[in-house]
Structures are given as C-alpha cells and as structure tokens.
Amino acid sequence: MPPLNLLFLSTTVGPLGSGMGGGVELTLYNLAKVLTQRGHRIVIVAPSGSMCSSFPVIEVPGTLQSTAQTQGRDAFIVMPPDPVLATMWTLVQQAHTEYDLLLNFAYDWLPFYLTPFLQRPVAHLVSMGSLTDAMDQVIEQVSLQFPHTVAVHTQAQADTFPFAERCRVVGNGFDLSLYQFCPSPERCLGWVGRIAPEKGLEDAVVAADKTGIPLRIWGVLQDESYWQDICDRYPDAPISYEGFLPTTELQQELGKCLALLMTPRWIEAFGNVAIEALACGVPVIAYRRGGPSEIVIDGKTGWLVEPDSVSGLVDAIARIEQIDRQACRQQAEVEYSLEAMGDRVEQWFADILASKW
Ligand code: HBI
C-alpha cells in the first residue's frame, strides 16, 4: 500500500494522556504507532494539553465536549461556547486537502455532519455503541452516503445500531511488547476503567467483599460521588484505589492479579483492558455483554458471567485456577497484536480509497 498522509482527529472530551478519552486514547496512539511503522505520515489534532510522544500533535484550545454517554437517548446535540470540536474542524476545513484521508476518533455529531462538505474521505472509528437518536441518525447518514467509512470495534457494538450491517468491525490492537507475561499471580483481583456508573465497579467491590480477595482498582476517578457512594456502602470491602497509571506501570501491576473483573452496565464497545490483562496472562471474568463477551473465550481465557450477577462473579472467581495463564497471552498475540490491527486498518483505508466517495 503506498504511504498515505493521514490526519487523525482526536476525541474532544479530554487531552490525549489525561485518561478522560478512555480507550480511544490508547487506540489512537497505537494506530499512529503501527501506521507510522508502515511508512504512513500522521498528524494528530487534539485538545490543548495533549501528549502523544513521538507524534506531531496540533493542539487546539477551547471548551471540551461533555461526555455523550451520560445523556439520554433523546438528548440534543450540545455545543459549548468556544468549542474545541468546532475549532478543530475549522482547521480541518483549511488543511484537509494536504492529506489523503482523515480518521475521526470523536463520538460527536459535528465530524459526521461535516463529512460530505469535505474534499477528502473521512474514516470514522466509532468508539461506543448506540447512545442517542441524534448520533445514530448522523452516523447512519454517513454510512449510507459513504459506504465502508464507518468502523466499530466489535460485532456486539455494531449490533447496538440499526445500521449494524453498514458497520465495519476492525477489532483493536496493542503493542504486546509493552506487556510482560506474569506466570504466578498474587492473591488479588483487578478492576480497570473510568470510575463511573456505566462501568459497574460496585459489583466487583461486592464480589471482593464476598470472596475476601483484595480488589485493586485502577483508572481515572471520573465520578467522585459515585466512588464516595461505593466507599460509604462497602466500608469493610478489601478494596484499594491505585490511581490512573500509564500503560507500562499499569501492566506491571495488573499482571500480578489472579483475574481481571469486567462488570460493565452498558454495552462496552470493546474493552481494551481485557486485552491488556490477557497480554499479561491474566484471565478475564466478564459479564456476557458487549465487547468483552466477544473477546473472552469462556473456560479457556476466562469466564463469561450472567450480566449483573454478582454470585456469577463469585462462582467464576472460585474456578479461576482452571484457566491457563499462558493461553491468555497466546490469545492476545494471535488476535490483538498491533500487526493484526494494522493489517485490518490498512485494508479498511484501501477499501475507502478504492470506492467512490
Ligand atoms: N463523549 N461527546 C463525546 N465524545 C467522545 O469522543 C467521547 C465521549 N465519551 C467517551 C469517549 N469519547 C471515550 O472515552 C470512549 O469512546 C472510549
């Protein structure tokens, strides 16, 4: 494939590196890494304060978008004063013809609405499932007018949209050389994610309380009152909040866990942390819901549990020794390496550039 000039448009809910962008930050960074290795030239546009080592970032000042997942289905599209998102896409309007293709990571209305106004193809990597009617409609419009350009991480995520058959499933990919395999764990469980209601942390806390196995928690403390409520309700649970760690430190600690608990209340689009755990040899115990239910091989690399069933979590924890930690690392290498994702994304771009747009 000839080298492409690519413009990456970041999520606008937080600067890259802040953790506010959740899995999208890691995905953006990993794609920049693997596509650069393959000779493509990448420029990233992101909110001021973004850090993306070794890649040129055009930082854009202004007010960040509010997160889409906390609004209801009939929520209106909200644009704050002095919006980073609009300033970013004014920059796109001015500079986009210098690029072969634009890759949008933002789960926001404006990038989709502006797509037909531009003279270069825009690939949209949709990072969450269906949340609001307004977003569904604008994404569907792009999927109709520009076939191939809307991609998602898993089939489960695609299936949340009425236009599932027009979503391209590209999975995800990680630099597995950053993750060390840990053959012998300590007696502790892990939970990783933005600490917010949709992530269902309280179920993991109750499971730790019932099993008496300490639960170590990593991630951005996004919703303080939610966290405080958990601490108030389970004062004796053996839990510890270990902060938001960058990848290399996180995998060092996560690898020591008996298992990672994934307790999403919502349809997790993918669940990057599941791969990060598998890459360290850590089995994943996850609700059979969304992305993780497509990643975990039940009984082989972890256990899939009846959604919202804490007793199911407790039973799975009791059987965790049945899972071979080597098989977990193996699955990450076969399905979720950066190389595998790089192949899938290059093929995606080739299909977009080959089709009329
Ligand atoms: N909300 N409005 C909005 N825009 C985003 O790009 C966005 C979001 N909420 C969460 C989010 N992105 C990411 O944390 C997840 O997609 C991973």
Image (cartoon, grey):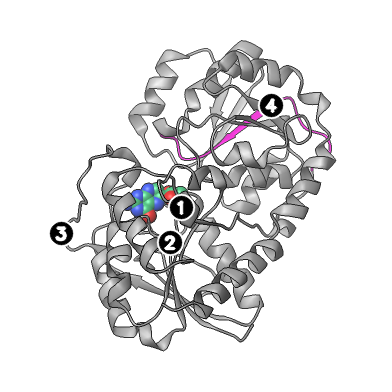
What residue would you read off at disc 2?
A: 105
Disc number lying in front (3 or 2): 2
Q: Kindly state the secondary structure of the residue where label 2 is placed.
A: loop
Q: Is mark 1 within 8 Å of ligand 1?
A: yes
User: Mark 1 or mark 2, which is nearer the start of the sequence?
Assistant: 2
Q: Is mark 2 within 8 Å of ligand 1?
A: yes
**Residue position marked by numbered label 4 in the rendering:** 188
Assign the magenta stretch its main secondary structure.
Answer: loop
Is residue 20 at all visible to an observer of this figure? no
Find residue 35 and name its label.
none
User: Residue 217's quadrant in the figure?
Assistant: top right
- Residue for point 24% across, 64% down: 62
The label nearer to you, 3 versus 4, is 3
Which numbered disc covers residue 127? 1
Residue 145 in percent (x, y) is at 36, 67
Measured as percent of width and height from the top left, residue 202 is found at 48, 22
Crowd rating for badge 4 (residues with CA inside 10 Å; few <14, some 14–19, many 20+) = some
**On the rendered structure, is 205 left or right of 142?**
right
Dot 4 falls on a residue whose secondary structure is loop
Cβ atoms at labels 3 and 2 below 8 Å apart: no
The amino acid sitting under disc 4 is Cys
Residue 81: give its label: 3
